Image (cartoon, helix red, strand yellow):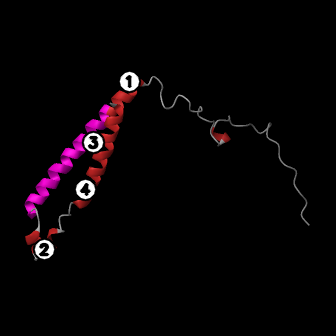
């Protein structure tokens, strides 16, 4: 069942990508109105927008629902977290942030070099 849902998810992803790329922007119909092959189009400008809008909405809903189902199935079968094997958080690189302020007595000055 999980393999079938993953295959369905990949198909929905590909179809959703294609339908989004096939759609035209709001200003793209201006060329079609001037006789750029609009008479031979399968869909009219309003029907084309409605069809692809509805198809995109359906595919987006199918993608989201399938994502939730896959996540639920995978989380119920696994008792471990992805972060269980991660290393603990390292100490900060800036040692000044964690150290207490030093007093004058504990700090040592480096010997001065003679200038020639």
Look at the numbered discs 4 and 3 and tell me whether their residues touch, using CB distance below 8 Å.
Answer: no
**Residue beneath label 1, please?**
76
Marks 4 and 3, how far apart at CA: 14 Å
Q: Position of residue 103 (x, y in %)?
A: 74, 37
**Residue beneath label 4, please?**
20
Q: Earlier in the sequence, mark 3 or mark 1?
A: 3
Q: Residue visible at 11% across and 67% down? A: 41
Look at the numbered discs 3 and 2 and tell me whether their residues touch, using CB distance below 8 Å.
Answer: no
**Residue beneath label 3, please?**
63
Q: Earlier in the sequence, mark 4 or mark 2?
A: 4
Q: Position of residue 84 (x, y in %)?
A: 53, 28
Q: Is residue 63 above or below residue 88?
A: below
Q: Position of residue 10 (x, y in %)?
A: 33, 45
Look at the numbered discs 2 and 1 and tell me whether their residues touch, using CB distance below 8 Å.
Answer: no
Which mark is in front, 3 or 2? 2
Marks 3 and 1, how far apart at CA: 20 Å
């Amino acid at each position: 069942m999980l393999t079938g849902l993953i295959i369905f998810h990949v198909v929905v992803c590909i179809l959703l990508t294609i339908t989004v790329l096939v759609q035209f922007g709001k200003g793209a119909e201006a060329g079609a109105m001037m006789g750029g092959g609009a008479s031979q189009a399968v869909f009219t400008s309003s029907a084309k927008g409605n069809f692809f809008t509805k198809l995109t909405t359906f595919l987006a809903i199918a993608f989201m629902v399938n994502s939730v189902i896959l996540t639920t199935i995978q989380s119920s079968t696994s008792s471990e977290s992805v972060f269980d094997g991660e290393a603990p958080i390292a100490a900060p690189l800036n040692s000044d942030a964690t150290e207490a302020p030093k007093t004058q007595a504990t700090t040592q000055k480096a010997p001065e070099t003679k200038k020639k």
